[in-house]
Image (tube, coloured by chain):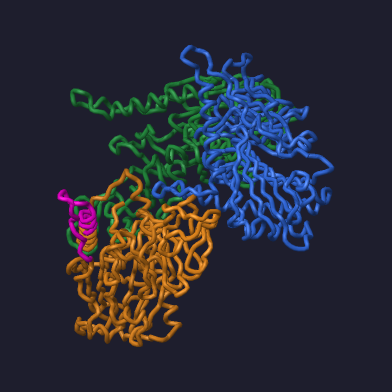
Chain colours: A blue, B orange, C green
Amino acid sequence: MALLRNCWYVAAWGHEVGRTLLGRKVLEEPMVLYRTESGAPAALLDRCPHRLLPLSKGTLKGDTIECGYHGLTFDCSGQCVRAPGQERIPPTAQVRSFPAVEHMGMVWVWPGDPLLADKVKLFDQLPQWAASQLASPAWGLNIGPYTHVKANYQLLTENLVDPAHVTYVHKSTLGTAAMADIPIETTQIGDTLLVTRWTPDSPAAPILQRFGKWPGNVDRWQYYWLYPPSIAVVDFGSHLPGMERTEVARDEGIRIYSCHFLTPETEASTHYFWLQLRNFAQTDAAVSQDIVDQFVLAFDEDKTILEAIQEAEADPRVETGVKLALDSGSVRLRRTVARLIDEEQAAATPSPSGTSAGVPARHGAKSPTPVSH
Amino acid sequence: MALLRNCWYVAAWGHEVGRTLLGRKVLEEPMVLYRTESGAPAALLDRCPHRLLPLSKGTLKGDTIECGYHGLTFDCSGQCVRAPGQERIPPTAQVRSFPAVEHMGMVWVWPGDPLLADKVKLFDQLPQWAASQLASPAWGLNIGPYTHVKANYQLLTENLVDPAHVTYVHKSTLGTAAMADIPIETTQIGDTLLVTRWTPDSPAAPILQRFGKWPGNVDRWQYYWLYPPSIAVVDFGSHLPGMERTEVARDEGIRIYSCHFLTPETEASTHYFWLQLRNFAQTDAAVSQDIVDQFVLAFDEDKTILEAIQEAEADPRVETGVKLALDSGSVRLRRTVARLIDEEQAAATPSPSGTSAGVPARHGAKSPTPVSH
Amino acid sequence: MALLRNCWYVAAWGHEVGRTLLGRKVLEEPMVLYRTESGAPAALLDRCPHRLLPLSKGTLKGDTIECGYHGLTFDCSGQCVRAPGQERIPPTAQVRSFPAVEHMGMVWVWPGDPLLADKVKLFDQLPQWAASQLASPAWGLNIGPYTHVKANYQLLTENLVDPAHVTYVHKSTLGTAAMADIPIETTQIGDTLLVTRWTPDSPAAPILQRFGKWPGNVDRWQYYWLYPPSIAVVDFGSHLPGMERTEVARDEGIRIYSCHFLTPETEASTHYFWLQLRNFAQTDAAVSQDIVDQFVLAFDEDKTILEAIQEAEADPRVETGVKLALDSGSVRLRRTVARLIDEEQAAATPSPSGTSAGVPARHGAKSPTPVSH
């Protein structure tokens, strides 16, 4: 499977990584994740180079991992620092390490060329809370549980540039019938996609009705930002009908940023990390829990649909052929990601003259900040 | 796997198909089954042509199915009648439909060329009850539960032209040791096979002893009718020793028609529908239940054997080589089905001169009615 | 998978084989095991040559098996002795039989050329108890439960020429930190491997401490005998520091022979039979049970490690490359087994002149008896 490799991916929630060893596969690479004594995250290939035992079956000793079979010990750069039963450490006794950083409460890894890994390339499109590690008095935060989906990550990202599915997949939580025939608008800014829809003068989403306390209908907005390859921020909410469609006016309504971080595990499965920010009941833990519960239900509806599609696609007898207007986000996204992968692979291939074709452009770097009030 | 496709197959019991969507694979084709508001059965390919989501994950609205992902809506001919978010329905937005009819309490589908589907080709070899939808005062009826078997359908149909297995597989229900060395007789009438055995002056089948109330031994008969590719009617029973072997004389004994409708799901699995008709205790529901219970036990004995053979055949290291006299039904059946498939495929291939080689003869059409009193 | 076939392998514990039919796969061959009325073990290919039903689904009648499908009946040489429904027994109605003998409380089979099977080639390296069927007043015996491991048998045998893993895999049962850096010594005597390690003046193994009642430190020995392809005897124990390292001196300490009989089931799974002999509390059943319990824990630690390696090896993306001093036993073992297989295959291939290249030498035959007091 072609994947963008020179890119930061979320491997785990910060609270999942600690002083025990966590094995997790990222972009088909088995990794072992842990924290050093100073608290910094570390990621190694989860295989001892001696007999291939996953290092995650070993023991964390200080900042090193001792293999659970013969005690070979590796530091967090992957260098073997002890080989029991002999003085000399074999020069091949090294395990691949992956750049790893903590950012926005999550541990991110870089599966590609480590020389290109740069913290400057970390996702930074929600600066007010990203800068403060998800803490801001203006925004209430809730974090969803780690979710595993048995579907290719692009089935999930397509779903996140697709406001149209909400009416049919999320009847009980997010969708309303009134939205069904409202067309979407798709914009591309650099590599970033923005798919929007306004549904005027209609009932609010079931999940928001009790917080808005609106007397009747509302204007609903959906702004789906997709930062290739696989981070999505959905800005959605409602305010009284007829209000302006500006950032400021949207902040006066009930507003939620639903943030999705998708990491390919294998060609057919995805790690799914998600959280929401809200501009109401910011410090109310019961509301945070309630929103998590609602989105667990909603994303389980997506999971059911997408896992069924993953299975159906595995049957070579049936092919898709129908394209709809509502696919414009998905089409552009597939095209953009394919181009980024092509660029990356071209840059990695030495040119005929022997020099590299260059470092791939930072994807997502030129896209504007969606939150800019 | 070569399969006879221009043929009615049972897809479900009538009571399984209603105003909810039932997904079921028939001859490797995923199908969604439902009833229209008028009660007629309908069958579509269980894939939305947009993103391949199984339509059975959608919603039944009137006589149409609304896809559970984006609301594309299809009527029961498979034509798309609504594409949310746009006026124009794409001409490719069509899903394959399958001819479907209700007959004898079951929903039958035609997986092959719809132009060749004809109700006249439905199974009609038991006219007195088939005509009246399984209701006849002369015959008590019991219906078995839908059964799934992890074995190729031909392992099941061979078992149903094979009276010899009864002694060994069904010791506790249908078999007796006395039958073991009685040879079978195999006749072929058109495409229909008839395999018979009379076991004179010996104990009745365990399952029949309590209904017959015979003072001692009986004459037992087994008439196995097999209508290719995969419908079987087993006429079996007992009467007092020395009575004639005619239809009339058999009706004076205790007589059961055990009817088997086998539908390939995949190359390695089969849908199994079965029922029995009996000429005793016709209206006694407790007897019906008792017979179901006995046959559930008996067919579970078959299932165990046939699934073990399916697994053993998957191991290419061991081959069969032994043919026995008792295989005559099985050999003829395999040969007949292979010929019917060859004929069907030849008819489907345009001849060199550009004209079709002809429609395959209706299989089973020339076979006589086994019940003709 | 290349395997040594002309060799006795343990197929089952004696108590597992009786007057019911036991199906078990040995070297990829499905076998059915049972005892004749005289008590002798018998092994046939677990497939009826008629329809491939496993014979283990049939019925044991006297010394014969009646197939559960049509009653074909085979004697313990595999010859068909009855074909129901016909007088003549087809000459092809024969099933392969395997030489089978009982020895040391276990049933052994010979998967290779039956003409080469000879009881003289049975494992006999512990004569004092082998001769008396595991009963000797000088030695207490405990037998472990049949264990199934989802790993290639060579992962297990390598583990049994590898004293170094004990420190890391068996922390709670057999290992101590003091052993970690003591080098091992590897000797090869004929085809037999001997890997030894003495750990002087250090704490005893956790499992032995309570039996030894030593005032302080001990000298620990580990003698790993490996009889290719897959029988291991580990002689281990402790005595007071500074005592001689002779057989006699070791008998004066606390001494255990841990015996391992490994039989490939498939390329990726192994039957594991084990027992221990001890020179203390010989007749104490509670001690026997306690030792079984401890080794169940210890071997479960191995099983976890080896099954994880089996899985890791299935991923072709990562390769091993590091060799350590502690691998010397494993390297020699792989080389020896590969040579024995080559010799066997060469002997089985007719030479260009048409004569056989000869019978492979008896493996393990020249190795010395480890117990020789």
Q: Report whether A58 appears left or right of B364.
A: right
Start and end of the magenta stretch? B340-362
The image shows residue A198 at horizontal and vertical percentages of 66, 51
Check the image and report above or below for A54 versus C103.
above
Q: Nearer the viewer, residue C141 or B206?
A: B206
Q: Residue at x 68, y 44 (%)?
A: A274
The image shows residue C165 at horizontal and vertical percentages of 60, 28
- Is residue A186 something one can see in this rendering? yes
Check the image and report above or below for B70 versus C211.
below
The image shows residue A239 at horizontal and vertical percentages of 75, 54
Find residue C199 and report its image quarter. top right
Q: Main secondary structure of the magenta part?
A: loop
- Is residue C194 something one can see in this rendering? no
Find residue B26 and report its image quarter. bottom left
Magenta-drawn stretch contains B252: no
Q: In the orientation shown, which residue stands out farthest toward the top?
A: A353
Q: In the orientation shown, which residue stands out farthest toward the left?
A: B353
Magenta-drawn stretch contains B349: yes
